[in-house]
């Protein structure tokens, strides 16, 4: 299936099965804002738990925080966001559509990369087992020509970004003959900087009101609290503070569903380290975070690191973990070595000392910080796009059937267990409810008695329920039920008394955590 079609189907599936809805839909929606439905919120909560537990439960020196969205406005001056949290925007004069200039150029680079990969794949098919990819890439004229164009463009782009040269960004778009996807024209405006922060007023009268910002990242709440946490928790460096919370960005282009939203949620951890050790810790957290992703079992080749072309004003090393979405490899998480930029700056703007006293060396210093920052919503999109599967099934009579199944890791599935009475009579519903009432204290369960068992299985497959059990007449005689496994569709007869143990073992979050 074409990846674009897959993505459309995924978006439709999310709506049909109560994962994600457009915000304010009855008023024709609000651009780039989404609501999570009954299954979406469960999946989201499970993702957050997986992240939180992997840091706060598994690391003695990582603790949590929940800071407010509203903060003193000077914080955003100190952090550099008032002056530098900008994206370069460009408008197409014919379609009146707005784009991020850097994204247009990045997409152009991805096109060259796509051409190269196509040649490689064609050759791989042609040569079979004898194919030597490195040699092919180093010698094939078409690959070399595209690689040369890509390298030249990349070099020019990085320089323009680092010089904040907006005219050059526009010139690259013109020289590369990049056209507006809507109008098809190359009639572009100049490139301008656009600040992404939302602001509002706090205070009841206009004289006393104060312009404040909706936080564009959760990290600053951690920085301004780091000494509170360190002192009250008697934390010793190195230590980390983890936080999950909403962030807001007035994104210029909000496309691709929940990939880029104006209101979204972040899971961020700031890890405070002695100056000079930050690059070691950066490497440590890079590997740890990649493992966290790969443990979900969607395939190691679905992820890659992508080092930043332009370092943010606060960083001395930065990389992204990218996931292969249906629309290509894109960032899901950033790992940044933020130096002492933020703490030094808050020290300066607030006039308060933010130094840590190291009891071992008897010295005061401002710690350096390594950050891991991931969007909950992007992680959600990663998981559902990897889990969404369409299958053709062969029936016993030779005919075919199909199903859509969300192959979610069991620990993350919104509903863990569905309980079905075979029929609505003969005491089967009562028996099924007795089982459900026992299980519901342990995990999210559902009861369904409407429609055939086959239809009920399909509905549970569509929301990713890993286990369904059916209560039939034999259950009344010997206390056994059939358990049906989502991915293999195999069924097994088990005793009710062993049910809780079987399922608990399989859906437990610790199964994932133990692999980290
Ligand atoms: P991008 O380059 O895609 O705009 P970014 O580099 O600005 O992202 P960071 O500031 O590093 O992103 O934010 C950390 C994480 O927060 C990202 O990896 C992403 O998962 C998430 N995130 C950032 N912006 C958005 C958004 N508008 N919608 C959803 N998630 C987002």
Image (cartoon, rainbow, N blue to C red):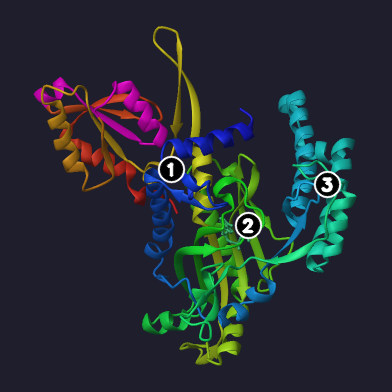
Q: Which residue is at a point 86% across and 55% down the rendered structure image?
A: 172
Q: Name the residue under label 3.
A: 178
Q: Which stretch appears magenta?
A: 449-478
- N-terminal of the two: label 2 or label 3? 3
- Whether the residue under disc 2 has CB within 8 Å of ligand 1: yes
Q: Which mark is residue 19?
A: 1
Indicate whether 53 appears above or below 38: below
Residue 352 is covered by the magenta coloring: no
Q: Name the residue under label 2.
A: 320
Splitting the image into 4 quarters, where does residue 503 fall? Answer: top left
Q: Is residue 337 left or right of residue 478?
A: right
- N-terminal of the two: label 2 or label 1? 1
- Whether the residue under disc 1 has CB within 8 Å of ligand 1: no
Q: Give the alpha-carbon distance from disc 2 to disc 3, as whole Å.
A: 26 Å
**Neighbours of disc 1 within 10 Å: few (<14), some (14-19), many (20+):** many
The percent position of residue 490, horizontal first and vertical second, equals 34, 24
> Can the viewer see residue 274 in this picture?
no
**Neighbours of disc 3 within 10 Å: few (<14), some (14-19), many (20+):** some
């Amino acid at each position: 299936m074409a990846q674009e079609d897959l993505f459309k189907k995924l978006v439709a599936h999310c709506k049909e099965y109560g994962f994600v809805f457009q915000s304010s839909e009855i008023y024709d929606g609000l651009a780039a804002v989404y609501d999570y439905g009954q299954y979406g919120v469960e999946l989201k909560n499970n993702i957050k738990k997986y992240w939180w537990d992997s840091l706060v439960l598994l690391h003695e020196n990582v603790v949590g925080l929940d800071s407010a969205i509203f903060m003193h406005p000077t914080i955003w001056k100190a952090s550099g966001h008032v002056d530098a949290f900008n994206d370069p925007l460009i408008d197409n004069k014919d379609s009146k559509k707005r784009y991020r200039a850097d994204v247009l150029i990045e997409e152009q680079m991805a096109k060259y990369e796509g051409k190269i990969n196509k040649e490689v794949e064609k050759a791989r098919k042609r040569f079979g087992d004898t194919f030597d990819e490195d040699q092919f890439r180093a010698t094939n004229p078409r690959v070399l020509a595209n690689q040369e164009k890509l390298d030249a463009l990349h070099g020019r782009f990085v320089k323009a970004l680092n010089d904040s040269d907006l005219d050059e960004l526009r010139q690259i778009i013109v020289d590369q003959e990049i056209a507006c996807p809507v109008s098809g024209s190359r009639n572009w405006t100049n490139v301008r900087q656009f600040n992404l922060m939302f602001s509002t007023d706090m205070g009841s009268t206009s004289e006393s009101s104060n312009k404040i910002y909706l936080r564009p990242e959760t990290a600053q709440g951690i920085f301004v609290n780091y000494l509170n946490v360190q002192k009250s928790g008697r934390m010793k460096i190195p230590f980390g503070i983890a936080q999950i919370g909403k962030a807001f960005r007035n994104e210029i282009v909000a496309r691709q569903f929940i990939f880029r939203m104006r209101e979204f949620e972040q899971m961020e951890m700031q890890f405070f380290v002695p100056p000079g050790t930050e690059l070691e810790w950066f490497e440590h957290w890079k590997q740890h975070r990649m493992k966290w992703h790969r443990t979900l079992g969607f395939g190691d080749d679905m992820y890659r690191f992508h080092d930043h072309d332009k370092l943010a004003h606060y960083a001395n090393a930065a990389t992204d973990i990218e996931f292969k979405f249906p629309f290509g490899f894109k960032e899901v998480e950033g790992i940044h070595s933020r130096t002492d930029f933020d703490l030094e700056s808050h020290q300066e703007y607030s006039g308060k000392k933010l130094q840590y006293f190291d009891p071992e060396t008897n010295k005061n210093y401002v710690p350096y910080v390594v950050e891991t920052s991931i969007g909950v919503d992007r992680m959600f999109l990663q998981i559902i796009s990897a889990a969404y599967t369409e299958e053709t099934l062969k029936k016993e009579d030779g005919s075919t059937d199909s199903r859509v199944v969300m192959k979610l890791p069991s620990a993350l599935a919104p509903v863990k267990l569905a309980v079905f009475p075979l029929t609505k009579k003969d005491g089967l519903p009562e028996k099924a409810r007795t089982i459900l009432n026992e299980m519901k204290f342990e995990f999210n369960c559902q009861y369904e008695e409407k429609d055939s068992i086959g239809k009920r299985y399909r509905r549970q497959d569509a929301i990713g329920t890993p286990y369904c059990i059916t209560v039939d007449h034999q259950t009344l005689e010997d206390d056994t039920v059939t358990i049906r496994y989502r991915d293999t569709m195999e069924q097994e007869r088990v005793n009710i008394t062993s049910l809780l143990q079987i399922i608990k073992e399989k859906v437990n979050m610790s199964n994932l955590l133990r692999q980290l």
